Amino acid sequence: NAGVTQTPKFRILKIGQSMTLQCAQDMNHNYMYWYRQDPGMGLKLIYYSVGAGITDKGEVPNGYNVSRSTTEDFPLRLELAAPSQTSVYFCASLGGSGNTIYFGEGSWLTVV
Amino acid sequence: DAKTTQPTSMDCAEGRAANLPCNHSTISGNEYVYWYRQIHSQGPQYIIHGLKNNETNEMASLIITEDRKSSTLILPHATLRDTAVYYCIVRASAGGTSYGKLTFGQGTILTVHP
């Protein structure tokens, strides 16, 4: 198992550009999450999904979109990048017999 | 979904037990309590989780009060490498309006000193 894989690890965007952060898990987990973490702050939930075809907003969804067409993938889309979206983004999945949460290694995004 | 309250920061001497409290007074009967920690900007690391009973693994012990309104994470012999932010989170119950939602609070900054 590769666990939760995020790409890219680092990206610099210009204001107004769009991009997609990819997240994939190979553990057949139903639950998946996207968080952002600003410097010195805690994790804030952007969007989450309880299964393929089902997504819901978290605490800070504005400026982002998600889709969940398969169990494995949960991409996060930034349509018009803004400096306020400079952050570290973590994808996570939850499942397994132990109901454990698995995190990806993070994607560092800078908007200039 | 149940909210959690943790102290902002705590100190612990190396080799001593670190006891990190968490209040989750609005927890529902079938909601799990999870503990995670985060070192610098790494992804959060799983420590332990529980429902009702006390739990122990190779990293820590989790003590949940009988009314389930609070819990304590115990690191039995803290080392300098245990310095991190510790998060107590509650997973929303199945069938609720926030089914599957997983929200992190601010966490506790634990500093282990020599």
Image (cartoon, helix red, strand yellow):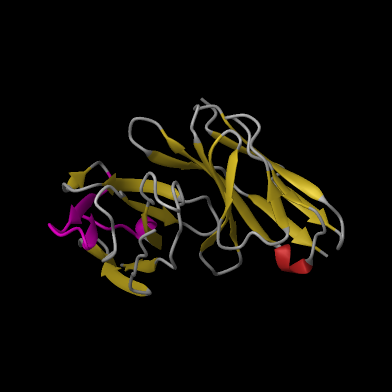
Asked whether B64 falls inside the magenta stretch, the response is yes
Quadrant containing the C terminus of chain B is bottom left
Q: Residue at the spot x=66%, y=32% of the render?
A: A69
Left or right of B13 in this view: B107: right
Q: Quadrant of residue B16?
A: bottom left
Q: Quadrant of residue B105?
A: bottom left
Q: Nearer the viewer, residue A67 or A8?
A: A67
Q: Position of residue A83 (x, y in %)?
A: 77, 67
Q: Residue at the spot x=34%, y=48% of the render?
A: B47
Q: Residue at the spot x=44%, y=53% of the render?
A: B97
Asked whether B48 falls inside the magenta stretch, the response is no
Left or right of B55 in this view: B90: right
Q: Residue at the spot x=71%, y=55% of the render?
A: A64
Q: Nearer the viewer, residue B15 or A106?
A: A106
Q: Position of residue A51 (x, y in %)?
A: 53, 35
> Is A50 placed above or below B34 here?
above
Left or right of A46 in this view: A7: right
Start and end of the magenta stretch? B59-82
Q: Nearer the viewer, residue A71 or A42?
A: A71
Left or right of A105 in this view: B31: left
Quadrant containing the N terminus of chain B is bottom left
Q: Position of residue B75 (x, y in %)?
A: 25, 55
For this orientation, the residue located farthest to the left is B66
Q: Position of residue B84 (x, y in %)?
A: 41, 61
Total count of labels: 0
Q: Is residue B8 visible?
A: yes
Q: Is residue A34 visible?
A: no
> Is B6 placed above or below A17 here?
below
